[in-house]
Amino acid sequence: MIAFLIKRLFHALLVMFVISVIAFAIQDNLGDPIQQMVGQSVPESEREALREELGLNDPFAVQYLRFAANAVQFDFGYSYVFNEPTTEVILRHLPATLELVAASTLLIIALSIPIGVYSAIKPRAWLSRLFMGVSIIGISIPVFLTAIVLIQLFAIGVSWSPFPGDTGWGAWLNDLLTTDGGMPAYGRGNPVPVFGTWETNFASLEGLTYLVLPAISLASIMLPLFIRLIRAEMLEVLQSDYVKFARAKGLSPRRIYFLHALKNTMLPVITVGGVQIGTLVAYTILTETVFQWPGMGLMFLDAIERSDIPLIVTYLMIVGLIFVITNTLVDLIYGLVNPTVKLTGKPA
Amino acid sequence: MTLNKTLLASVIGAAMTTAALSPAAAQAETTLRMAYDADPVSLDIHEQLSGGILQLSHMTFDPLVRWTRDLEFEPRLATDWEQVDPTTMRMTLREGVEFHSGNAFTAEDVVWTVERLKRSPDFKAIFEPIAEVTAVDAHTVEFTTAKPYPLLPNLATYIFPMDSAFYSGNDADGDPKDEIVKNGNSYASRHLSGTGPYEVTDRRQGVRIAFERNDAYWDESSPGNVDRIVMTPISENATRVAALLSGDVDFIAPVPPNDLARIRADEDAKLVTMSGTRIILFHMNQERVEAFQDPRVRQAFAYAINQQGIADRLMKGFATPAAQFSPQGYAGHVDSLAPRHDLEKAKQLMAEAGYEDGFEITMMAPNNRYVNDAKIAQAVAAMLARINVSVDLKTLPKAQYWGEYDDRAADMMMIGWHADTEDSANFHEYLTACPDADSGAGQYNAGNYCNPELDQLVAEANLEVDLAKRAEMLQQVEQALYDDAAFIPLHWQDLAWAATDNADIAPVLNVMNFPYLGDLVIAEE
């Protein structure tokens, strides 16, 4: 176990090292940060002085070594835009993103397991077919479109009345097609401070209303995937010999489905899920942009737009770290669920 | 003392923010919730010369004089100004004005501010003409210029007197409080004390910035009745519009042209548009392309472009077609100059110059800097195809584009320009003056156009204190640039703002895009 964790730690360091080298190597293509810092009419001589001051004229190796020497002391430099250490900037934006991902993950878990299991147990029921149909649509709609449609429907509201409003059925149908809006369209509202830079949207009803639309649109990418994954795995497990044996033994269907079958269904789901949570962090870039959710994704996009290279490099390294951590956690959980798997990879 | 006061103010501000959440407190106050595409990068108004910083300056400070909607000067902290002799201007300052810190505003603050401006990398170039500022008495200052300089009142619109006592001394880290730091943490970038209508109470960069009305604001004739302003940056166009339509914010800017119709159609929102002062143009690089050295070729290009078509169809009327740098209201604006779209004439000129079969050029434009910039470039490329010029077009995000621009990486390059001085001479100095790396002249002249006579004329105009005479000289320059087809002007990009019905934004807006929010009136519900 300890050996496994130490191995993973080295793994994480390696990933962060590689990312930092790549990020540094491409920084020249990310644009000129000086251009973003000064006004249009600032003479070239002033720009050159600033460039020199920031060390942007030094060769790649010198710049990288300077960065690396500071980075091993946990100093990742100053953001050009925020004028603060990049780690502080990211730390301040991290809770918003983690809360959004957590809300989406809860949503995905709460919906995908029952729906997936149901449509595996009753593959021919019309409800199962409906779920499968909707999930295909869900997979194929890009997340920013989902987000914009959600804003239009539930934040701005639509009134659509194609049916005659003076008849009872017409009014009822029109009512069905009309939404009031009123949900917040952007930002986090007034989150409740917990400690330090962490403010939460989970602590108040008002905070939760801000979380609903972004969480749904973020979940909309992964939810269909998980429903289909759980369904497929469950169908396979239900065909296996031990399930047939359990049935023959006369165990109650509930016990078979939810104790024996579900447990084995979840093994591959956990592996995929862990990796996908990392991907979810990446997808927050789109969701956060549309909803102006003040998290890391929005911050990163702004950083790219403003050529804030130190912030870009730090962000990429931290996202790399998050990927390594989630993968490690997945492996640990996997070990708990399936004790036959040995973490260190030695044969059992 | 002053530091404690700021601390206290921010504590009170934070307390009020919480209080505002309870419905009873919210009703007593008028709050404006607004969304811009970006929030100010710093609280130090000398750190960057940009629209965002100037918008902040007008909310939290007051300039000596400011522009009215008709581009006239309106006295603010300076009540009167007179030219004592050709190189000296004397300004009388308003009495009884206090900074947010409680310090009294005096001539020393103006002197201190101008000296700081002359140290700021962004502002020092435009404050170059001022040789000396002296405080004659507590409420009189004298500006001395090395040479006669007609634009001092224009410069005064950039002088937002800062609280010299508040910004003097050292901060907790031992750094001077008046330090101007581009990349790093400075006292002035986090603390603010001005004379303006609003005080900053809470600032979380990239998330929001909150303002509270300055109770002791000197301008008692201001109709403004807004007690609190909460500004949120929303960079995504669609979200900004959605936030207004859903009632989450009361005021947004800029409004993307694609959503103008949507806002007009909405019952609870209103739209204000104005012809802007930012000229969008293409340079034709004479150094890279020999053909561009022939004025007939440049004229042919100018004749081939249909500015009206771009403004009508591409910009959906959200632009004013241009044939010169200076928009209406500027000294150099020549009324008679109109876009000269004439395809036959263009073909004939190309033939005369010996290029009837055309040639190949490269073109670059940004794709997220100006409204519809990439589409405009595509349209221009298509129009040039009709005079047999084949264009290899590349569009780039602005972060990468300006590096290419500095390298003059293509034969035709797009740029938009707003004159910081709201004056015609500025256009020529940066965009069409003979490039000179030492003096900084023609810094953005990607056409390498060079006409020493015009440079001379502009230099003389800048010494001419007789404004009517000066305007005539600047108009000569515009006419000559037009005749020579030194560049291809496209249009002045329009400005648009939108607000909920009860916010009366129209009177506080202007072409510089500095809404005077101190004077904003929100009708009681």
Image: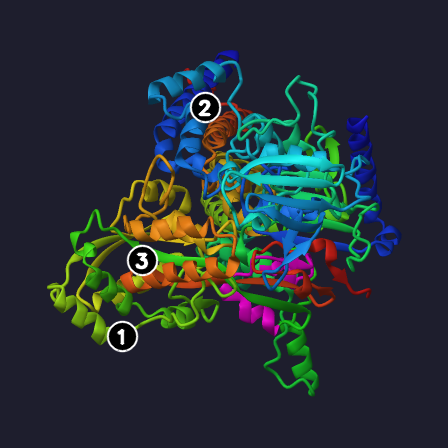
| Pointer 3 and pointer 2 on the same chain | no
The magenta region covers: B241-265
Image quarter (top left, top right, bottom left or bottom right) of the N terminus of chain B: top right
| Residue B189 visible somewhere in the drawing | yes
Measured in 3D between alpha carbons, the distance from the residue under mark 3 to the one under mark 1, in whole angstroms, is 17 Å
Q: Amino acid at mark 2?
A: Glu
| Residue at the front extreme of this rendering | B85
Tell me the quarter of the picture where residue B498 sits.
bottom right
* Tag 3 secondary structure: loop
Read off the chain for label 2. A
Q: Which mark is residue A53?
A: 2
Residue at horizontal 35 percent and vertical 34 percent from the top: B438
| Residue B433 within the segment the image draws in magenta | no
Q: Amino acid at mark 3?
A: Phe
Which is more toward the observer, A283 or A297? Answer: A297
Which is more toward the observer, A287 or B327? Answer: B327
| Residue B162 visible somewhere in the drawing | no
Reading the image, the residue beneath label 3 is: B487
Measured in 3D between alpha carbons, the distance from the residue under mark 2 to the one under mark 1, in whole angstroms, is 51 Å
Read off the chain for label 3. B
Reading the image, the residue beneath label 1 is: B342
